[in-house]
Image (cartoon, rainbow, N blue to C red):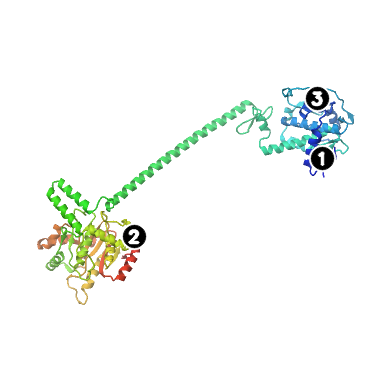
Amino acid sequence: MPVCDICCEEFLSEADLKTHLLLSHLENEMACPFCSLSGVSYDELSFHINTTHIENDCQVVNATASDSSQRTSSDNTLLSPIHEINSVRTSETCIRAVSQASTHSLGRCQVNGAPTPNTGATLSKVTSSKVNSSPPAAATASGAFKPLSNCHEKSWEGEHRHRKSKQMRLSSPNKEGHFPCPMCSVVFSDCFILQEHVESHLQDQDMAEGAVSGLGISTVACSRGNYRLDSTRYLCPLCSLSCSDSGSLQEHVDLHMEYDSTSTAGNADLNLARRLQEEEERKWKEAETKRESEEFKKLQRQFGLDCSGGYLKQMERNMERAVSRGQMVPAEFHRKKAEMRESLASGMEDGRSKTSGLMAALYRHYQREVSDCAHVWLCAETDHFSSSEGDKGWGCGYRNFQMLLSSLHKMEQYNLLPEAVPSIPRVQAIIEEAWRQGADPQGASHFNNRLQGTRAWIGATEIYAVLTSHSVKARIVDFHKPTGPGDTHPRLLEWIKLYFSHSSSRGARLPPRIMQTSLPPVYLQHQGHSRSIVGVEQKANGTLCLLLFDPSFAPGEMRRVLSQDTAAAMVRRMRKFPGALKHRQYQVVAVEGELTAEEKQSRILNSRTLCAEKIP
């Protein structure tokens, strides 16, 4: 346990002992080791020794140097050079140690056993401005004094080795001495050896403080305003580089400024380039969004989903345009408008676009002219419905559905269908009713569950959904790719021939050359248009061709079939050979009978994921 050598008090640790020495023995009474001055502060005592006893201090140093040279052969210098910032702290610590020793022993310092003479000078009161501001002096072995600034020219490694040698030299103190170290428990017989020992403590503390702060001597030097490392070195305030003179430092700082300005200009160019790129990307996105919006609107107009009005509005606009061009008198305009509104109110087709009796006329035509046909199959009696001014450009699907309904109405088994052929707005309402029953929910979502008041196109799936909702058994066959040379569809023609010839050949050894079946027409859909297949021809060489009712044929053109003189020319327009069917994909809807209630419900449920029969 540490014990105080002065008052014999015991302490728990060395730190407590050091604190006791400082507060109880060093602070209470300060005495000059060279004279009888006492009762002053550390700062006053330091100033007194440095000004009054400077010559005595040098003599003591010389005597101590001769005594220490006998014990230490490797070091001729007794007082190690210290940095400018540590000189005051070292003097104060030495004064405390010496004053403690003088108080504890004889009140004076001994050098080689001889008392040091006292001058008897008293401490004069001076202001802090009179403190010696010149660099502190260090005593050498010869007694001469050298400025500490010259000592600073030693390298840091040399100072470190010198300090370690001092610690090794002072590690075995003379137990007979009377000068204990105020920072550890070592006791010395010579006050100047004690001073060297205290200096080693202070230098170790300075090194630790410099490592923690990361600034070292340069921080103290910079705080003086001229950023000097010492009397001959200058520190850069931006990168801590030391320069030999102020001119070099100025040039170095100018390089910093030039680099900063160049970096700022480079950053400005980079920011400008980024802004230009962002602006270009923004404009490109806006143009792309605008283009997509225009294409979407174009598709909406093409498929009648642009909310520009349905059948009624288009009919009125076309009649108004005809009046403005002089093609229709105002009286006729008002008469047709009233008839149209009356027809739409009843929900039935007014019959202006309908042509009847065509299948019988075709049968008679083939009976007269069959020289190049080996077999001809015709569907049941079907009326033709032409596009009108109210649905031109988008109503082909509705018109083909009217043709199919006109044929089914003539068959007794399909009694659940409407009694008469509905108008186009009424057909739109019927399809919406089928959607509400649960048929084809994907198609309903495509049209947003609304067809009335629009010019929306319909296709094979809408025809299938409305037939299923009326208990009519139908099938969709998808010829999704060409099956013949030149992107033709011979499999499509073979399937149509099989559809019409299968029922007519039952029980007959040889099929007749001209056969009108009891089957309804087949709905044919391809990209952008739809038609109705009402028959098929087989030539003598085996070539097949279809007979089509096209809604684009006007009623006047279709009535030419009824005349023997013009029938042949019109039939040629109705024929479609394999080379004329070159669309990528075709879909057909064929009616095959009636559905029971259970079958109807099952098909409605299955239509949630509607799948067509694909060929091939």
> Which residue, given by chain and number where applicable, does mark 2 sit on?
442
Q: What element carries label 1?
A: loop
Q: Can I make out residue 485 in this image?
A: no
Q: Which kind of residue does numbered mark 3 sit on? A: Ile
Q: Mark 3 points at which residue?
A: 54
Classify mark 3: residues with Cα within 10 Å, few (<14), some (14-19) or many (20+): few
For this orientation, the residue located farthest to the right is 113
Q: Which of marks 1 and 2 is nearer the N terminus?
A: 1
Q: Distance between the residues labelled 3 and 2?
A: 109 Å
Residue 339 sits in quarter: bottom left
Residue 482 in picture, x, y percent from top left:
29, 62
Amino acid type, callout 2: Gln
Mark 3 and mark 1: Cα distance apart in space: 29 Å
Q: Residue at 47% of width from left, 37% of height from top?
A: 271
Left or right: where 267 falls relative to 506: right
Real-space CA distance between mark 1 and mark 2, rounded to the nearest whole angstrom:
97 Å
Query: Measured along the vertical axis of the image, is residue 88 above or below residue 411?
Result: above
